[in-house]
């Protein structure tokens, strides 16, 4: 190894609540030789998850795309065998690529209107600049359709905000002080591993851990009590717990009187959720429901870690809303170490107007904000959108409601920070759309993914080691600066660079398209004349301090020992009543049910479709991938060997179909079909099967679980319903 070494402070930009501070050791040849967690960052605590501990495998992978590529003339779009991509694509210069792309976008905009161009991005990078800055400016100025980024957390986020106004949560570090921790649809060990040491510490001090998850995750296996609830029935469980709490007088009357709105009406609503009724929905016993309610209400501090798994169901909004109310009912917020956390993202108030410049839409040919296209319905957007226009009617969704994304068909798709060929629901519809010969597709990514197989142009992107960034988090309260550790390999370029350059090729003259990364970082932080941020909660932050320390806590979290942060315990909340809303004035005004209620998902064992497809499928994430990211790396795949390409089944469901461990099976419904190997798992609730999200092209048959999932949307927030999926299974 060459020396001497530099140590550079970076931030892991993957879509994970932990947003770790990562120290990168760089040798004198400019090569990164080691990544490790920053021991001085209180949540990172000096360690990385297993997937990012092996990050140099990704950065220096021989499979990285290093140059812009163009589809060779006349080659149809469709799945490619791995390693053969170079036969289909040819290298071009950045200049050629940018010029051709700009010309095509201009021609499509002229012919069909700019809304026929659709950006498609999610959280491939969570850095403020990489997630959404120059790209947002570019598409606004172009007049392209806006993307409604609903695929992950919309239902739960809105549900939480209906109750609390804003997404704050118990500080992650404070979980160590809890006496009871409830992990509700939260695979902490897999998805949020930096919370785990806090839980271990709490348990050393006598705390108990309860996990509510249909799947026996590693977290569940390590818990004091694993409650294997049936998917999509959590609203019933939360309402049932409240039934017991109110019936037995275990609620916190003072907290409810001072801080909440609508408790009386909530108490009336939950009266119908008797433990017996809730037991019939959830598959638990009435005794278990009563015990859970009593344990929760009588142990303080009680900390609830709810994660987004619970809201990827048709009724996920109601479920998240009912669960979110629990810490308010028992007054858990008033105890340090108690309360709850879904996300801490509401605490980061970036100057988004300056970063994203939505006002540029007025300078577009549209001279107004463009239509919104829901990203959960990419299949429909690419195959149906605009087709119904001649009849003069909007497209209706599966429930008959008129959709808001009527308009011209999509003729150009620009994908970055996302791999919709793998992660979007109803994959066969997505692929039919992507394969259209009249669709112009650009993909900016680091590898040949399921989506690049359908691209006209592929552009090489950077990792978080290769550009400068600023970042918040959805699982802690630190603003962090990520330094550039190494030069990008080959001709890889960042999102900011790409969209700045494209803007020049389009002839956009606004000066903001020439902003440097440092300028955008200062805009995001709203750095004022005295060098300090003007964003709420960031007033003490300067660029110099971020440079020096790498991570700086938000104002309210600067001295947690002297001044602990207890969310929602004082001041006026950002709800219509200024209080925690059990009864939602917003929903009431919209003519909707203001109180949470349990309605079984149509795609569940209680729905019509269960006659033909009786099994509920959980198409789950992997502990050692990040959604579809890392799936192409051998080392990461090895760590997932046990469940890769497996269909986990309850033994009773397997026996009823004459299926034995290791049998090849076909999993199917009206949308698609998948070949997997049966693996018996008695810890699943009967009637529930589970499989993993993977790259489609790495699975037998070239399809993944998303051929089975639907484009149906959640009750609140129009989010994705990956976990409301019915299937049947047959031995092959
Ligand atoms: N290792 C790893 N870490 C990740 C990710 C990853 O793919 N891998 N993904 C990242 C992303 S995108 C996100 S959004 C975050 C948060 O991640 P989440 O969205 O919370 O993760 P999931 O694994 O989808 O869901 C969490 C748990 O909910 C369970 N679940 C599913 N349906 C139900 C239900 O109806 N009721 C209940 N009670 N539980 C249910 C699942 O079995 C799962 O164990 O994690 C991030 N971190
Ligand atoms: N069946 C099923 N489907 C799911 C889920 C599930 O649990 N089950 N989870 C859903 C959830 S919660 C989410 S959030 C979505 C996530 O869906 P995506 O956001 O699409 O997540 P990834 O699969 O991680 O793909 C991100 C892509 O961005 C690329 N990328 C990384 N950094 C950069 C960069 O700086 N620039 C550019 N241009 N590209 C970059 C990565 O290489 C990767 O290919 O998937 C959803 N789909
Ligand atoms: S993926 Fe999450 S846990 Fe792993 S290093 Fe990144 S932020 Fe930390
Ligand atoms: Mo997500």
Image (cartoon, grey):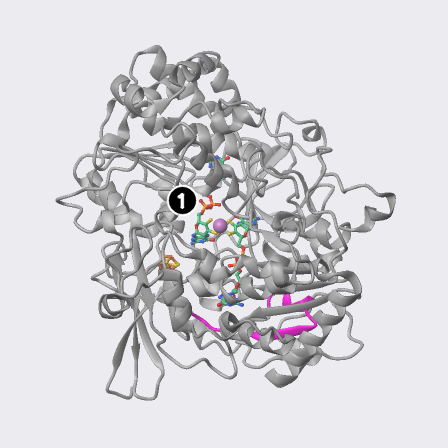
| Image-quadrant location for residue 179 | top left
In the picture, measured across the screen, residue 364 lies left or right of residue 510, that is right
| Residue 333, horizontal then vertical, whole percent | 27, 32
| Image-quadrant location for residue 453 | bottom right
Q: Is residue 652 visible?
A: yes
Q: Is residue 125 visible?
A: no
| Residue 462, horizontal then vertical, whole percent | 48, 73
Does mark 1 have its CB less than 8 Å from ligand 1? yes
Q: Is residue 483 above or below residue 652?
A: below
Most extreme residue toward the left, as rendered?
562
Reply yes or no: does residue 314 show up in magenta.
no
> For the residue labelled by badge 1, is the local secondary structure a helix, a strand or a loop?
loop
Q: Which residue is mark 1?
A: 187
Nearest the viewer among 345 and 53 is 345
In the picture, measured across the screen, residue 265 lies left or right of residue 33, that is right
Nearest the viewer among 56 and 96 is 96
Which residue is found at the position 41% from the left and 30% from the top? 323
| Residue 290, horizontal then vertical, whole percent | 36, 17
Mark 1 Cα-neighbour bin, 10 Å: few <14, some 14–19, many ≥20: many
Most extreme residue toward the right, as rendered?
391
Location of the N terminus by quadrant is bottom left
| Residue 611, horizontal then vertical, whole percent | 71, 28
Magenta part of the chain: 449-464
The count of marks equals 1
Q: Is residue 677 above or below residue 14?
A: above
Nearest the viewer among 473 and 584 is 584
Which residue is found at the position 60% from the left and 75% from the top? 502
Which residue is found at the position 61% from the left and 64% from the top? 141
In the picture, measured across the screen, residue 155 lies left or right of residue 624, that is right
């Amino acid at each position: 190894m060459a020396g001497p070494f530099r140590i550079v402070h970076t931030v892991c930009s993957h879509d994970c609540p932990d947003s770790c501070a990562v120290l990168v050791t760089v040798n004198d040849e400019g090569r990164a030789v080691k990544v490790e967690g920053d021991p001085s960052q209180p949540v990172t605590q000096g360690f990385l998850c297993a997937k990012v501990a092996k990050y140099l495998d990704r950065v220096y992978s021989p499979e990285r795309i290093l140059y812009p590529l163009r589809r060779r003339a006349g080659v149809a779009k469709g799945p490619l065998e791995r390693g053969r991509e170079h036969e289909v694509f040819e290298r071009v210069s950045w200049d050629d690529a940018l010029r051709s792309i700009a010309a095509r976008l201009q021609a499509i905009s002229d012919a069909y209107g700019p809304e026929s161009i659709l950006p498609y991005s999610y959280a491939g990078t969570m850095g403020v600049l990489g997630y959404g800055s120059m790209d947002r400016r570019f598409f606004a100025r172009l007049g392209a359709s806006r993307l409604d980024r609903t695929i992950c957390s919309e239902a739960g986020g809105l549900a939480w905000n209906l109750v609390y106004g804003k997404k704050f949560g118990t500080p992650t570090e404070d979980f160590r002080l809890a006496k009871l921790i409830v992990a509700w649809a939260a695979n902490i060990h897999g998805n949020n591993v930096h919370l785990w040491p806090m839980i271990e510490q709490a348990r050393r001090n006598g705390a108990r851990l309860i996990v509510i998850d249909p799947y026996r995750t590693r977290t569940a296996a390590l818990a004091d009590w694993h409650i294997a609830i049936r998917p999509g029935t959590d609203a019933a469980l939360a309402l049932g717990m409240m039934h017991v709490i109110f019936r037995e007088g275990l609620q916190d009357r003072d907290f409810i009187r001072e801080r909440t709105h609508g408790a009386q009406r909530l108490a009336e609503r939950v009266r119908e959720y008797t433990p017996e009724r809730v037991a019939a929905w959830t598959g638990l016993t009435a005794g278990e429901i009563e015990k859970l309610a009593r344990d929760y209400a009588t142990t303080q501090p009680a900390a609830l870690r709810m994660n987004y798994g619970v809201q990827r169901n048709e009724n996920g909004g109601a479920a998240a809303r009912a669960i979110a109310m629990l810490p308010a009912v028992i007054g858990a917020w008033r105890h340090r170490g108690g309360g709850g956390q879904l996300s801490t993202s509401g605490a980061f108030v970036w100057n988004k107007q300056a970063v994203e410049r939505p006002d540029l839409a007025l300078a577009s040919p549209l001279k107004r904000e463009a239509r919104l296209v829901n990203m959960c319905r990419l299949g429909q957007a690419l195959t149906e959108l605009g087709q119904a226009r001649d009849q003069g009617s909007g497209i209706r969704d599966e429930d008959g409601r008129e959709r808001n994304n009527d308009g011209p068909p999509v003729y150009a798709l620009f994908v970055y920070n996302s791999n919709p060929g793998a992660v979007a629901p109803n994959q066969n519809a997505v692929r039919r759309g992507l394969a259209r010969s009249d669709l112009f597709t650009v993909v900016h990514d680091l590898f040949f993914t399921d989506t690049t197989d359908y691209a006209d142009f592929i552009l090489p992107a950077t990792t978080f080691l290769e550009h400068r960034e600023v970042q918040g988090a959805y699982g802690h309260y630190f603003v962090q600066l990520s330094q550039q550790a190494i030069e990008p390999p080959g001709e890889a370029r960042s999102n900011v660079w790409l969209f700045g350059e494209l803007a020049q090729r389009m002839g956009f003259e606004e000066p903001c398209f020439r902003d440097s990364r440092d300028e955008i970082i200062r805009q995001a932080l709203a750095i004022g004349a005295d060098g300090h941020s003007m964003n709420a909660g960031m007033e003490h932050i300067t660029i110099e301090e971020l440079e020096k320390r790498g991570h700086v806590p938000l104002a309210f979290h600067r001295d947690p020992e002297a001044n602990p942060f207890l969310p929602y315990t004082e001041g006026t909340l950002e709800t219509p009543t200024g209080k925690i809303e059990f009864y939602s004035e917003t929903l009431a005004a919209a003519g909707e049910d203001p109180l949470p209620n349990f309605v079984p998902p149509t795609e569940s064992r209680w729905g019509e479709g269960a006659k033909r497809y009786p099994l509920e499928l959980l198409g789950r994430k992997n502990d050692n991938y990040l959604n579809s990211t890392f799936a192409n790396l051998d080392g990461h795949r090895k760590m997932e060997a046990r469940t890769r390409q497996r269909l986990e089944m309850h033994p009773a469901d397997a026996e009823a179909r004459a299926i034995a461990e290791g049998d090849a099976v076909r999993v199917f419904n009206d949308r698609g079909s998948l070949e997997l190997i049966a693996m018996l798992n008695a810890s699943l609730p009967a009637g529930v099967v589970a499989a993993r999200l993977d790259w489609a092209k790495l699975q037998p048959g070239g399809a993944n679980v998303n051929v089975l999932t639907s484009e149906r949307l959640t009750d609140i927030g129009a989010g994705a319903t990956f976990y409301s999926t019915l299937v049947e299974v047959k031995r092959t």
